[in-house]
Image (cartoon, grey):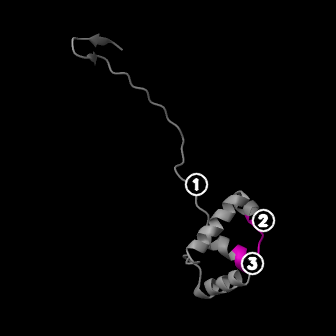
Amino acid sequence: MYLKVGARQGTVKEQIVWAYEYPIQWREPSLNLTELARLRWINRISIKELARRFGKSKSSIDYHLGMIKKKNFHLVGLTETERDGIIRKCKIN
């Protein structure tokens, strides 16, 4: 690189280009929340077992279960019968 210093500012005469390639993933693949809801509240699978099955931490599973509750169990692929059954089970517990 050649830098010419003038009265007002420096100017670059030769451009330097670096190019690096990094494999990145912007977002983790999301969990199938419908499957998670079915396994947790219909099949009564423990959080520890869900964490093992999905390859996530227990806190991550807890977080996603909380998100399902915040959505009031409105999930694509979950039938109204399943949703109503889950809501009843959650109110009992």
**SS state under label 1:** loop
Q: Is residue 90 left or right of residue 74?
A: right
Decide: few, some or many residues near mark 2? Use Cα within 10 Å; few <14, some 14-19, many ≥20.
few
Image: 91 above or below 13: below
Give the quadrant of residue 5. top left
Asked if labels 1 and 3 touch by Cβ distance under 8 angstroms, the answer is: no
x%, y% of residue 42? 71, 80
Q: Is residue 22 left or right of residue 56?
A: left
Amino acid on which disc 2 is placed = Glu
Nearer-N-terminus badge (2/3): 3
Image: 16 above or below 68: above
Which residue is the site of mark 3?
A: 43
Residue at 52% across, 49% down: 26
Residue at 69% across, 83% down: 91
Which residue is the site of mark 1?
A: 28
Q: Quadrant of the N terminus?
A: top left
Give the quadrant of residue 47. bottom right
Nearer-N-terminus badge (1/2): 1
Which residue is the site of mark 2?
A: 49
| Mark 1 → mark 2, Cα distance in angstroms | 20 Å
Is residue 43 located in the magenta-colored stretch of the structure?
yes
Give the quadrant of residue 56. bottom right
Image: 82 above or below 15: below
Most prominent secondary structure in the magenta stretch?
helix
Q: Seen from this angle, which residue lies furthest left? A: 7
x%, y% of residue 81? 62, 88
Tell me where the magenta segment starts and ends, as one range. Answer: 39-50
Amino acid on which disc 1 is placed = Glu
Residue at 68% across, 64% down: 62
| Mark 2 → mark 3, Cα distance in angstroms | 12 Å
